[in-house]
Amino acid sequence: MRVLIDECVDPRVKAIFTGHECTTVHDEGWDTLEDGPLLALAQQQFDVLITIDGNIEFQQNIPKLQMGIIVAHVAKNRLVHYQALQRDLLEAVETIQAGQLVHVPATPT
């Protein structure tokens, strides 16, 4: 899968997505883009976006996207917290579909 790491996520998180093509919003030079234009560009080149922005699902029309979005729920935006979720994050990346949003870890409903 082609994975894009949002600018709000610790960029070292790239290291936990072994076996996947992974880059950051910063690496792409898209730091200044708002979410709408960012997603419009990203869906042309990536399969999934990893973010910690829990509001993205209320601000964007996710089902219309040609990529999936994973919202990582971490205590702090530090690599060690993402590493604790590595198995769940990798599973989400490997199973997510276009137009789908997945919370990791899943929030109780």
Image (cartoon, rainbow, N blue to C red):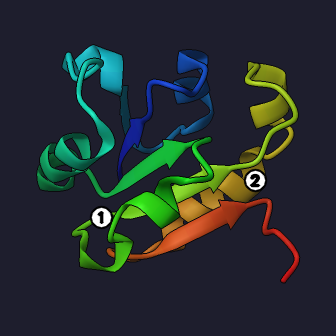
Is 7 situated above or below 40?
above
Q: Nearer the viewer, residue 8 or 20?
A: 8
Identify the residue position indicated by label 1 in the image.
67
Crowd around label 2: few <14 · some 14–19 · many ≥20 (10 Å): few
Q: Which mark is residue 87?
A: 2
Looking at the picture, does residue 45 appear above or below residue 10? below
Q: Please name which of the two marks, 1 or 2, marks the residue nearer to the observer.
A: 1
- The amino acid pointed to by label 2 is Arg
The percent coordinates of residue 37 (x first, y second) are 17, 43
Q: Nearer the viewer, residue 95 or 11?
A: 11
Gap between marks 1 and 2 measured at Cα: 21 Å
Q: Which label is found at residue 99? A: none
- Residue 3: quadrant of the picture: top left
Among numbered discs 1 and 2, the one appearing first in the sequence: 1
Q: Quadrant of residue 86?
A: top right
Question: Circle 1 — which element?
Answer: loop
Q: Nearer the viewer, residue 95 or 60?
A: 60
Residue 34 spot, x, y in % from top left: 28, 35
Position of 12 with respect to 61 (left or right) is right
Residue at (22% x, 69% y) in the render: 66
Identified at 32% across, 43% down, the residue is: 35
Q: Residue at x 75, y 53 (%)?
A: 87
Residue at image coords 13%, 44%: 41
